[in-house]
Image (cartoon, grey):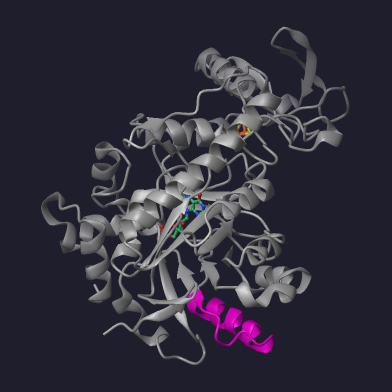
Amino acid sequence: MIEKIRISGKEVFPVIEGGKGIGISNGYTAGAFAKVGAVGTFSGANAEIIDKNGKLIPLTFKSNKRLERYIERIEYSIQGSICQARIANEISGGNGRIHMNLLWGMSGTERTLHEILKNTKGILHGVTCGAGMPYKLGEIASSYKVYYYPIISSMRAFKALWTRAYKDFRNYLGGVVYEDPWKAGGHNGLSNKENPKEPEKPYSRVVDLRNFMNSVGLHETPIIMAGGVWNLDEYKDWFNNSDIGPIAFQFGTRAMLTKESPISEGWKRKLLTIKEGDVVLNKFSPTGFYSSAVNNNFIRQHINIVNRQINYSETKNSIFNTPLKYNEDPDVYINNEDVKKVEEFKTSGNNIMMKTPDNTLIFVSSDFSKKIIRQQAECTGCLEACKFSSWSTNKETNYNTGIRPDPRSYCIIKTLGDVLYGGDIENELVFSGHNAFRFAKDPFYNNGFIPTIKELVDRILSGK
Ligand SMILES: Cc1cc2nc3c(=O)[nH]c(=O)nc-3n(C[C@H](O)[C@H](O)[C@H](O)COP(=O)(O)O)c2cc1C
Ligand code: SF4
């Protein structure tokens, strides 16, 4: 029998829905988790506004200026999150707990958080925050008496947050989410110290985290294990274990294959067919973080681009001494050894060159280069700093990162939005946890069975 645990001020089952942007975990899914006594988490990143009749009011930009569209997006996101919190609360019937997830790297997060918390008093119980170092999260959430949950992937990261900021806001630190950076879906917090090819077991990393938490008096604060969790059965030795302390579990990928999940039928069917190794860690995200996604055409295309890449120099020197005609611009200089490669790239139809911020050239087709340039021009400033378009929210640097736009990346809001609204799951970004192959192996999903969230939580609680 799985015991309840105190999360955000209430006894709930230790089962937490992982927040998933954009719009993949929403008020409907969060409400369903909470209704059965667990914790539901809607995504506050570009949350949708739904009218009184349940109809989506889509975000349509009034302005065609990036700076104004960036503000419009933030305003929409605020209203959308308030709306999703209300939906979740209504569905929950007052059971369980409702959390919101924010990607700290989204633009305007601090203002967004203030506005949402101001308008969701009593119906939003916690905020989880990942993808970055959310130093301000503790102060902001505490000022509204709302619990906060940083998502970290190492004890070191939590130590930095604690020492610099959270130690002054300990009362509302609801828990610490340890997200396994080798296993979890979405963005992954791998640092330079960790090798993406050498996964480390979560147990000892969570014990490290607990030791640090105990050393600063956080014995009673739960750790929430996320990334690769399938069955609570497999974590029997984590319960009632003083090395681990109070523990709950977060489910990202598994929660996507439910009746309430808003992803397309095609995406749900795809999840049922994923094989081991089909999900890859990659570094293409415009946030600069690692992320985990299904190795479909979208990812393969980006891998191929990286493989069609050579170093170059704007000026001639002893290494880069061979001139290369750069599209319609002045020549650049490459190493003589790369001349043959360039010919091969061009004869394969990839005859347009694009410069990267790492002093390399990539070779792409004319259609692909047009798509990149169009999407960079259509940027609506969703991130604090974007590798793909060089957009930055920093006014002092004229809303530019000062780093050359990176054509090896992509517009995350565009591709995630497209795939959510029924886009082609082979040709858009499909974030997924590395354990997705277990759908095909778990008898629970035999004959393509897709459970309701209640059935999923029952299954998880029964240990399976
Ligand atoms: C499609 C998808 C989108 C996600 N989006 C976010 C997000 O916006 N913010 C976030 O903090 N985590 C995000 N995550 C991570 C989940 O909340 C969760 O921690 C993770 O998926 C746990 O690993 P699992 O997939 O193995 O269960 C996402 C995960 C997936 C699969
Ligand atoms: S290019 Fe796309 S991902 Fe980057 S900031 Fe603009 S809208 Fe966001």
In magenta stretch: residue 61 = no
Instruction: Name the spot of residue 437 as percent of width and height, x first.
Output: 30, 55
Taking the image as shown, residue 453 lies to the left or right of residue 123, namely left
Q: Quadrant of the N terminus?
A: bottom left
Res 446 → quadrant: bottom left
Taking the image as shown, residue 110 lies to the left or right of residue 62, namely right
**67 above or below 172?**
above
Q: Residue at x 62, y 84 (%)?
A: 218
**75 above or below 281?**
above
Taking the image as shown, residue 216 lies to the left or right of residue 267, namely right
**82 above or below 374?**
below
Instruction: Name the spot of residue 325 as percent of width and height, x first.
Output: 73, 11
Asked if residue 24 can be seen in this view, the reply is: yes
Asked if residue 104 can be seen in this view, the reply is: no
Instruction: Name the spot of residue 233 as percent of width and height, x first.
Output: 29, 78
Instruction: Name the spot of residue 36 as percent of width and height, x first.
Output: 28, 67
Q: Residue at x 15, y 50 (%)?
A: 448
- Residue farthest along the top direction in this orientation: 328
Say which of 46 and 111 sits in front. 111
How many dots with numbers?
A: 0
Ligand 2 picture quarter: top right
State whether the magenta stretch is mostly helix, strand or loop.
Answer: helix
Q: Quadrant of the C terminus?
A: bottom left
Res 93 → quadrant: bottom left
- Residue farthest along the left direction in this orientation: 447
Say which of 28 and 456 sits in front. 28
Say which of 151 and 49 sits in front. 49
Question: Magenta region: which residues?
Answer: 202-223
Say which of 128 and 55 sits in front. 55
In magenta stretch: residue 205 = yes
